[in-house]
Amino acid sequence: MVWIRWRDDPAQLGQDLAQAAHILGLPEDRLEEARTGRVSLVDAVWEHLATVKVWLIVIDNVDTPTQIRPGSELPAAYRGWLRPHRGGVLLVTSRDTTRQTWGPDADLVHLQPLADDAGAAVLLDAAPHAGTETEAEALASRLGGLPLGLNAAGTYLSVPTSRHRTFAAYQYALEAEFADLLGAEHPGAATDPETARRVVRHTWDLSLDQLHQDGYTLARPVLQLLALLEPAPVPRSLMTPELVTDATGLPATAASVDAALAGLHQYGLIHTPGIDGSGEDVPPLNQLQLHPLVRDVTAHTLTRPEPTDTWLTAIDDHLDRAVDATTSMPGRTGWPTARLLAPHLPAHLDRSTQRGFATAVNTLDDLADALNNAGAASEELLLRRHVLDAETRLLGADHPDTLASRDNLATTLNDLGEHQQAADLHRQTLTDSERILGPDHPRSLSSRNNLANARARLAEVGRRRWWQLPRRR
């Protein structure tokens, strides 16, 4: 095996591959002919490697494959330094994951995050006295199984002078000290790519810098916008040119946003669950998702309070628009998008407590109604609970809007089969409605009807259980 590190220098790569071929038996006289220009060095190297059996050459960190020479073509042309041959294996590691770059003969292997037990093993190897296997698995899960994050945490915990010495303490500290533990800058990262690759705070900057140099000028701001949303898949339809421009002030078109997302996907910074194999098999609704650690690092490295406040205001405005557009779609068309939007709306309501609260509540209620029609009771429950909690906190438990939201939550619980809990909540709401609004108020009448429905469902379940009891002999 020969290991070669790519250093953005095609000439150096040529020398390294020539040396590898020499190690694998390329005659000195043939090598001298190539060095003196009498034959092509790249052809001499690969003509020889094609005759050798069972070899492995690793070219590591090829982050700029377009610069591999000789020639001006992409590696996919197979006429430069990277060529497929059956005699051995050429293994290239890169952030670029596209078939267009590497060609039809390349076997693309996308490295996935480690499972929790494997991540725990990495942590325990680095810091064997930092806690139990269960605690290590919990920390590995929090770090999303990303080897870079696991290595950073394990290295930190292995140092006797570190403030946090256990897996549990480190995981707890991440919530308050993320910027210091995994978001800290390294003074040498700006000038040394090798250092940047080993530092969580900087490693993705290498990809973003390369994308910017390649003309994907919106890649970084688009990634930052996605990081300000919740750690859940985002419908592609939310990431519009209008959102990008309203948030960042940068000119954006449909084509430039498409290009930015394609570039981020190419470098593995975003994933498309259900489409690129990183999620479950779902209908091909276009959706975007960040690795949890990519999201956390990106969100923590934004300048505060600006541009975050401006960006969040734009996000909230466009979430309102997205829900309006989704709930206006005919039939079942908008249901898949409604389910994707649901996890992002509680934070939207929280940010709207000082301004536009009523609008945000209407947005959540409208989407919850759509989710009810779609039979997505779990997502509906998330929104109903959040609306009730927010209204109870800001408007008071006896406000008519709060009573209506309590009724909505109870109805959702009834749909989920929680009939006793639903009946208890409807009974409480009816009592409060009669006391505050009067027994003949439409809200009280509706609450009384809902309580009757919940009791009927509860009685039906009780009868079903009775008939299922085995008979005595």
Image: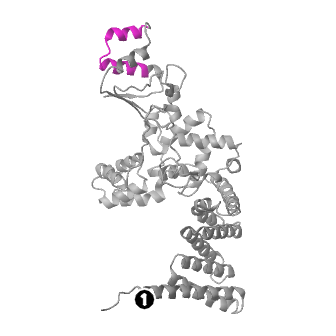
- In which quadrant of the rendered view does residue 446 lie? bottom right
Please determine whether, in this image, residue 290 is positioned above or below residue 346: above
The residue at 66%/91% (across/down) is 434
Residue 177 appears left or right of 225: left
Which residue is labeled 1 in the image? Answer: 466
Q: Is residue 304 above or below residue 442?
A: above
Q: Residue 280 location in percent, x, y? A: 48, 55
Q: Is residue 249 above or below residue 44?
A: below
The crowd level at tag 1 (other Cα within 10 Å; few <14, some 14-19, many 20+) is few
Q: Residue at x 55, y 87 (%)?
A: 456
Can you say which quadrant of the picture contains the C terminus? Answer: bottom left
Give how far across and how far down residue 347 sits, in percent.
Answer: 59, 63
27 in the magenta segment: yes
Magenta part of the chain: 13-36
Question: In x, y percent, where is residue 470?
Answer: 35, 87
* Residue type at the position of mark 1: Trp
- Residue 423, above or below 240: below
Would you say the magenta stretch is mainly helix, strand or loop? Answer: helix
In which quarter of the view is residue 353 placed?
bottom right
Q: Position of residue 7 (x, y in %)?
A: 45, 27
Looking at this view, name the residue that lies furthest to the left.
129
Quadrant containing the N terminus is top left
Name the residue rendered at 35%, 47% in the picture: 155
* Residue nearer the viewer, 280 or 471: 471
Q: Secondary structure at mark 1?
A: helix
